[in-house]
Amino acid sequence: MVMGVDKGASLLWLSFLFMSGSRALDNGLALTPTMGWLHWERFTCNTDCSKDPFNCISEQLFMQMADVMVAEGWKEAGYEFVCIDDCWLDSTRGKDGRLRPHPLRFPRGIRKLADYVHSKGLKLGIYQDVGNLTCAGFPGSLGHYEEDAQTFADWGIDLLKFDGCNFGTVELLAEGYKNMSRALNNTGKHIVYSCEWPLYEKDFQKPNYTEIRKYCNHWRNYGDVYDSWSSIKSIIDWTADHQDLIVPAAGPGGWNDPDMLVIGDFGLSRDQQITQMALWAIMAAPLLMSNDLRMIDAQSKALLQNREVIAINQDPLGFQGQRLYKMDEFELWERPLSNASFAAAVVNRREIGSPRAFRLQLFFIGGGSPCKKGCIVTQILPFRNHLGWQKPDSVIPLSVNPTGTVLLKLLPSSKLSHNVLEYSSIL
Ligand SMILES: *[C@@H]1O[C@H](CO)[C@@H](O)[C@H](O)[C@H]1NC(C)=O
Ligand SMILES: *[C@@H]1O[C@H](CO)[C@@H](O)[C@H](O)[C@H]1NC(C)=O
Ligand SMILES: *[C@@H]1O[C@H](CO)[C@@H](O)[C@H](O)[C@H]1NC(C)=O
Ligand SMILES: *[C@@H]1O[C@H](CO)[C@@H](O)[C@H](O)[C@H]1NC(C)=O
C-alpha cells in the first residue's frame, strides 16, 4: 500500500512536469488563475427589473459589485474581474449587425460600464456563445466572430466567457473556439479567453488538451456548479477521476475551470465552504465568486479573502494539484508549490458522525522527497495553527469535520535551519 502510493505519486508528478511545458495561448494573460466575480450562479437569468430591481441583470448590479469589491477589500485580496454572464443582450442585433445590450437594463451601454469598472481599478468580463444562440436564447456569435471580438475590444472588455450552447457539430465547435481565439488576438487588445470547449466536446470525443491550451486561458470541463454540496462533490469527484488527463494541461496561461465559488450563498455549510475553498486552491482553479458581495456574512468573507489560501491558488509555479488517495472515506490531495513547498488537503467525505481523526504521514506528501529532512507545517484551514517543525517520519494527527477539509502548507526545512530561523525571529 505505502510503496504503491509512493511510486504512483512520483510517476504522476513526473508525467506532469513533462507535459506542463506545452504551449499556452500566447496573450500574456492568466499567468495565475483568474480571480473575480461572475453573476451566473447567484443571479442567473433574472431580467425582471420592474419586480426585482436589486437583483436583476443590469448595469446597476455590476456597478454596485465593483463598488463593493473596492470598498470591502476584495480587490486588495486579488479579485480583479467583474464578469457579466448570459442575459445581458437585447433580443436581436442592431441594424449594423453589431451586438447590443438590453436597452432598459444597460441604458448607458457596455462601453460606459467598462469605463466605470476601469475607473475602480477593476476589469470587466462579458459573455457570448460559439453557436447561433446563447444558452438562454439570445443572439450567439456564430458567423460573427471577428465583428463581435472587435465590438468587445472597442468596448474595453477584458475577459470573454465563451459558452458552447447551440453548436452544430463537434468540428464546428472546435473551429468556432479557435476562430474566436484568433479574432480576439486580431483586435490587438489583450482579452482573457474563457472557454467551455471540452465540456461540450467530451460527449462526442476525447478533448485534446494540448490543442485547447493553445487557444484558451481557461476551460470548463464539467457541468455548471449549483449552490449545493452534491454539486461541489460531483465536481471534486469528476476532477479526481480525470486527473491523469486534465492535470498535465494546467499551467501559467491555461487552467482547468471547475466553475464558480458558491461560498456566501445558501447551500453550503461552513465545513463545505472550507472544502470548496481548499480544493479550488489545490486545483489551481480560477476563483470566480458568484454570490452577493453587497450582503455577505463575515465568515464567508474571511474565508474567500484568506491570503494564505489565495497564495496557494495563485502559486507562480502554476502546477495543478491532485488527489493522492482515497481511503476509509478520507481523501488526501496535494499540490506542489514554489520554493519546494507543498500544500496538502485532507477531506472527510463521511456525512455522518463527529470529527474524525486522520493521521497524516509526512512521507506520503510529494512522494516522500519534500520533507526528507523535515518540514515546517502550518494548518491554514479550518483555522490557522502553527504545527512547527516535523521530522521526516512524523505522523501528524488531524481532526476533520464531516464534509470538511483540513488544509496544510509544508515548507521543507532541516531541524538546524529551522532552529536558526526561530532564533533569528527572536532577535
Ligand atoms: C497575438 O498572438 C501573437 C502570437 O502568438 C502574440 O505574440 C500576441 O501577443 C497576441 N496578441 C494579443 C493581443 O493577444
Ligand atoms: C444557425 O442559423 C443559420 C441561419 O438560420 C442556419 O443556417 C444554421 O444551420 C444554424 N447553425 C446552427 C449550428 O444551428
Ligand atoms: C473559421 O475560420 C475559417 C477561416 O476563415 C472559416 O473557413 C471557417 O468557416 C470558420 N468556422 C467557423 C465555425 O466560423
Ligand atoms: C493534439 O493536438 C496537438 C497540438 O495541436 C497535436 O500535435 C496532436 O497531434 C493532437 N493529438 C491528437 C491525439 O490528436
Image (cartoon, rainbow, N blue to C red):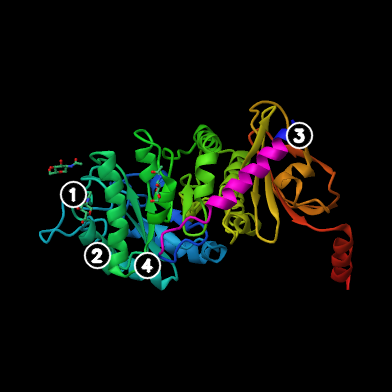
Q: Which numbered mark, 4 or 1, is in the foreground of this view?
A: 4
- Residue hosting label 2: 150
Report whether 121 appears left or right of 377: left
| Amino acid type, callout 2 | Gln
Mark 2 → mark 4, Cα distance in angstroms? 12 Å
Disc on res. 190: 4
Q: Give the mark nearest the N terminus, 3 or 2.
A: 3
- Residue hosting label 1: 91
- Residue at horizontal 24 percent and vertical 45 percent from the top: 131
Q: Residue 313 sits in which quadrant?
A: bottom right
| Amino acid type, callout 4 | His
Mark 3 → mark 4, Cα distance in angstroms? 47 Å
- Residue at horizontal 85 percent and vertical 58 percent from the top: 414
Report crowding for label 4: few under 14, some 14 to 19, many 20 or more residues within 10 A (C-alpha): some
- Residue hosting label 3: 2
- Residue at horizontal 23 percent and vertical 43 percent from the top: 137
The yes-or-no answer for disc 4 within 8 Å of ligand 1 is: yes
Element under disc 2: helix
User: Could you tell me residue 238's position as x and y percent?
Assistant: 51, 35
Asked whether the residues under the numbered discs 3 and 1 touch, taking CB atoms below 8 Å apart as contact, a structural biologist would say no
Q: Is residue 12 magenta?
A: yes
Q: Which residues are magenta?
A: 5-26
